[in-house]
Amino acid sequence: MISATKLQAAGYAACPIIVLVASPAFAHGGDVGTGGLVAGFAHPVSGLDHLLAMVSVGIWGAELGAPAVWLLPIAFPLMMAVGGVFGILGVPMPASEVVVALSVLALGVLVAGAWRVPLAAALVVVAVFALAHGYAHGAELPDSADALAFTVGFVVATGCLHLSGIAIGLLGRWRGGMIAIRTCGLLVAVAGCYFLFGNGRA
């Protein structure tokens, strides 16, 4: 049975979904818990597998063009917040770490090949991977961290990583830039193989 404390934490963690949809002003939000916010922001950046996957989503979105260039970076944090709630509640998600590693490999291949797929298919791919990444963040929530602040932190960091990926993806407008992007995609895919088969999760 899920405890009341975990239910309350999950409720807090779900707030970023509303935040992303409604875009309210944080000026009236009160203290969000600096420690949890900082820890949450640092979490995606400190894990190489998370960082590579999230930047790759931005690059792939830029390769696909509008509307994917902004829909994918919106869908990923939303679904990641859902996965974070599942992780906080301890909802079983078998092989989530494998899916995280697989996401690095798959996204690297998608970027390297500049694969153009229907928007719905791209959103499904991103949503599945986002759930796994969010679950990993939620499951690793520090005991002392504020669930809301931590979740807001990792969602904001994710958005920043997506923006970085989009900026990199825009280099594809030039021939030399496209070569560089595809090379980066291959390197990301190699890293994904390492995470997936070498048990080398960062």
Image: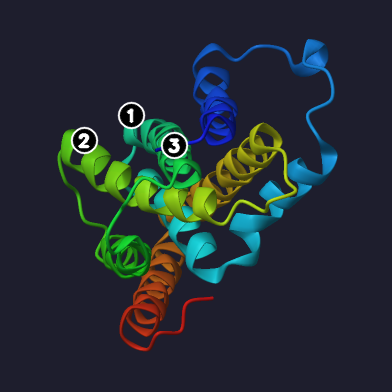
Q: Which residue bears the numbered disc 1?
A: 67
- As drawn, which residue projects farthest toward the bottom? 198
Circle 1 residues within 10 Å: few <14, some 14–19, many ≥20: few
* Viewer-proximal residue among 193 and 114: 193
Give the Cα separation between the discs numbered 3 and 2: 37 Å
Q: Using the image, determine if residue 47 lies above or below residue 7.
A: below
Tally of marks? 3
Tell me which numbered mark, 1 or 2, is placed earlier along the sequence.
1
Residue 77: image tag:
none
| Residue displayed at 22% across by 41% down | 124
The answer, for residue 79, to whether it is visible in the render is: yes
Q: Secondary structure at mark 1?
A: loop
Name which residue type carries label 1. Pro
Q: Secondary structure at mark 3?
A: loop
Q: Quadrant of the C terminus?
A: bottom right
Name which residue type carries label 2. Leu
Q: Using the image, determine if residue 169 lies above or below residue 12.
A: below
| Residue displayed at 64% across by 57% down | 43
Q: Which residue bears the numbered disc 3?
A: 2
Q: Secondary structure at mark 2?
A: helix
Q: Which residue bears the numbered disc 2?
A: 119
* Quadrant in which residue 146 is drawn: top right
Is there CB contact under 8 Å for labels 3 and 2? no
Q: Nearer the viewer, mark 3 or mark 2?
A: 3
The answer, for residue 173, to whether it is visible in the render is: no
Q: Position of residue 11 (x, y in %)?
A: 54, 25
| Residue displayed at 15% across by 39% down | 118
Q: Position of residue 130 (x, y in %)?
A: 38, 47
Give the Cα separation between the discs numbered 1 and 2: 8 Å
Q: Position of residue 46 (x, y in %)?
A: 65, 65
